[in-house]
Amino acid sequence: MFENLTTGALPSLNALRAFEAMARTGRATLAAEELHVTHSAVSRQVKALEEQLGVRLFTGPKHRLELTAAGRELLPALTSAFDQIAAAVGQLRSEGDDLHIAVNASISVKWLIPRLGRFAAVHPKVKLRLAELPSHATAYRGAHAVVRIVPSSRLADPNVTPFIQSHLGLVMSPALAQAHADPLDAPRLMAQTHPQGWAIWAALAGVELSPAPAQPFAHLHFALDAAIAGLGVAVMPWPLVADYVGSGRLVAPFGFCKAESAFALLATPGVASRALSQFRTWLVAEGGRTPAPPAPTFSP
């Protein structure tokens, strides 16, 4: 009765899921953990998908696979589709006031969680669940939205709601500042999740940094705690350090430069709920409470 409009059979859903997870995580072992199957099962599914599509999706040795052009073209559409499916199913399973938000660890620890008491006070019925968003990710499977720093080029996206303009600056303990007449001579601290932070700040400030080693830390909030402890000077976004600078636990010797980025909420496409709308409105209002950063004072 109905004409079959498909040009060919779609690949196995399991094969598509295996490829998407392996491409997104970068490793078959991580994909297997996520999908609760064996490593060999993921590899078999991906190989079967390549055979059915007639294209190679990965290239290189097993220990260092990279996506081919075909794989890079296929991945975004699959990730978006599976994210929307997971969010839609999660919405049906949850009560109307459940809210699942994924957030970068440092934003969660140093900005969001200390303020969540105010959100709970005005929206006591919302059951908020937080998950850690990987530093590189802009979406999280099953989440209503994610919170992270995004480049200004993404702010025109209708699913993106900025709530604080990002500014970058150097911070250090008062004692360390007294010990170093030139803050740039102090030991440098660097977050592995933001390894380009020093280079970005230098470009914004118009400074040419001399080569120097930087002590690495896994996350921005680890590097921030190291700066508070007087171990060195770190490049930090203003919202994460505003309270520490205001209380005098940190000083910002050169002020803060406006960055081409913002703290933002990225809603999963196609997902909407009363709880998400309330959280979005609260975030914008809370962002407005953040004091303005000290103006840049560095003279190249």
Image: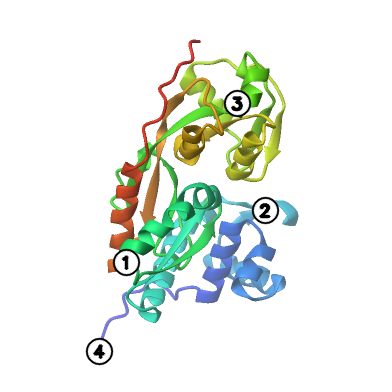
User: Circle 1 — which element?
Assistant: helix
Q: Is residue 211 left or right of residue 275?
A: right
Percent across and percent down for residue 52 are 55, 70
Q: Is residue 78 left or right of residue 182?
A: left
Look at mark 3 in the image and give the residue it sits on: 174
> Given this view, does label 1 or label 2 mark the residue nearer the observer?
1
Look at mark 4 in the image and give the residue it sits on: 1
Please name the residue shown 37% across and 75% down the image. Answer: 91
In the rendering, which numbered label is found on residue 3? none
Pick out the residue farthest to the top: 300
Q: Which residue occupies the foreground of this view, 170 or 26?
A: 170
In the rendered image, the vertical position of residue 117 relative to residue 93, given as above or below: above
> Given this view, does label 1 or label 4 mark the residue nearer the observer?
1
Label 1: how many residues lie within 10 Å, few (<14), some (14-19) or many (20+)?
A: many
Q: Are marks 4 and 3 in contact (CB under 8 Å)?
A: no
Residue type highlighted by circle 4: Met
Of labels 3 and 1, earlier in sequence is 3
Q: Are marks 3 and 2 in contact (CB under 8 Å)?
A: no
Of labels 4 and 2, earlier in sequence is 4
User: Circle 2 — which element?
Assistant: loop
Look at mark 1 in the image and give the residue it sits on: 275
Figure quadrant of residue 277: bottom left
> Given this view, does label 4 or label 2 mark the residue nearer the observer?
2
Please name the residue shown 58% across and 69% down the image. Answer: 18
Mark 3 vs mark 1, CA separation in Å: 42 Å
Please name the residue shown 69% across and 51% down the image. Answer: 60
> Residue 8, can we see it?
yes
